[in-house]
Amino acid sequence: MADPVTTPTVVDAPAGLRRERRGWYLYDWANSAFQTTVITVFLGPFLTTVTELAAGCELGADSCDGYVHPLGVRVAAGSYYPYLISLSVFLTVFVLPVVGAIADRTMHKKRLLAGAAFTGAGATIAMALVTGERYLLGGALFLVANIAFGAAVVVYNSFLPQLAGPDERDAVSSRGWAIGYLGGGLLLALNLVAVTLLSEDGNPQRTLDLARWSIVSAGVWWAVFTLVPLRWLREHPTVEAVRGGGRNVVTDGFRQLGRTLREIKAYPLTLYFLLAFLVYNDGIQTVITLASQYGTEELRLGQSTLIVTILLVQFLAFGGALGLGALARRIGAWKTVLLSLVLWTGVIIGAFRLPAEAPLPFMILGAAIGLVLGGSQALSRSLFSQLIPAGKEGEYYGFYEISDKGTSWLGPLAFGLVFQLTSSYRVGLVSLLIFFVVGFALLAAVPMRRAILAAGNTPPRVL
């Protein structure tokens, strides 16, 4: 009989389990607003403008060569936000595994989720205070929000193995990812409509204020909708958490993390999967990050085309996640992810051949990205859940999130170096093919059934 402490069993009423899953899905709906509205669209231009004001540039200027001096370091205004992203990634590498280890040792995982989520949402809402030249406050709030976002995702992901068995996990993960894209896209659409209707030509201050309140709206959305999963999810403490009783979970978590780092070499196939994910996911993240720059600089497309394409990607990713999840039930998640990498290769080749100043082909390519994006990410998450030793979900998802975010500089670096050598965005884009080709080869070489058994888990019927 399965241990009732760690796994839902037949004593769980089906309606109760469905309610838990719906709560779990809705956290993706809640936090995706931060990723889309804040990170993807508004924060970069907003914080860069605030930094330029602090550097003595005029509001609405086309360019600015001014400098700011955070902590006495001379930084170009335009480089401040990219440096913040790099710093947040660096700090995340240290924070996420620790949060995961604590999640595995605590009897109150929902409280940990609440603490991380409300910290991130609160920092996002506090962006309302970033007025005038307060670029340092904006930078500090971004660091807190982004690190808390990653920490909450680690705790959130660690619920997945406890809410679905091996044969249901792909479908549950795909639904969660799809709901997230729908929620993030909905708020982004509302904000873009508000900006379009309320902005005034020749009034850059108005545009800056609208961007600020759009960012704040994402924090409010994140906080309000997090209340639902906190109510509907149940605690599923691990056996080790129950045995630990009232011990200090923070110090216990650090000790456990140290043991896991020493013992992880006992699961080489799990590490090999992480390596494959690191490579192909870096290609995915780079395409997402640089798509707008490619559209504006190489294809000479207008802002309205980019906005429509971003929304198209968000809403089609909802259907794409569900569609690839359905395909995974027929042929298995491993084969479906491999197929998605072939499709990503086609996306890169298609982007290389796009004509300049042609919005429709760019939007069609965006639609293709949306259809393959959600499924490849959702099924990678559920595949990895099969490779985690029981009771260590939080820790391993901490490492997974590092692979997701902590190496996201490799693709942009390759793109940047190739562009510097060739002065061609098209050739730079083609350089990303290596991430999908090598990632495909590495993932194809993982013996998934043997890897799942080596982690002490039961393989799904279709893999």
Image (cartoon, grey):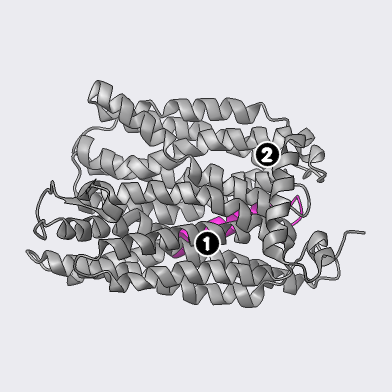
Q: Is residue 267 magenta?
A: no
Q: Nearer the viewer, mark 1 or mark 2?
A: 1
Q: Up-down: is 389 above or below 441?
A: below
**Residue at image x 22%, y 57%?**
51
Position of the C terminus, as image quadrant, is top right
Q: What's the residue type where badge 2 is placed?
A: Ile
Distance from the alpha carbon under mark 1 to that under mark 2: 23 Å
Marking on residue 195: none
Which residue occupies the foreground of this view, 166 or 390? 390
Marking on residue 331: 2
Residue 115 seen: yes
The part of the image, by quadrant, that contains residue 192 is bottom left
The part of the image, by quadrant, that contains residue 283 is top left
Q: Magenta region: which residues?
A: 163-183
Judged left or right of residue 226, residue 158 is right
**Residue at image x 47%, y 37%?**
282
| Image coords of residue 223 (percent x, y) | 48, 74
Residue, far right: 1
Badge 2: residue crowd in 10 Å (few <14, some 14–19, many ≥20):
few
Helix, strand or loop for the magenta stretch, by majority = helix
Q: What's the residue type where badge 1 is placed?
A: Ile
Judged left or right of residue 434, residue 229 is right
Which residue occupies the foreground of this view, 343 or 225? 225
Chain-order first, disc 1 or disc 2 = 1
Marking on residue 179: 1
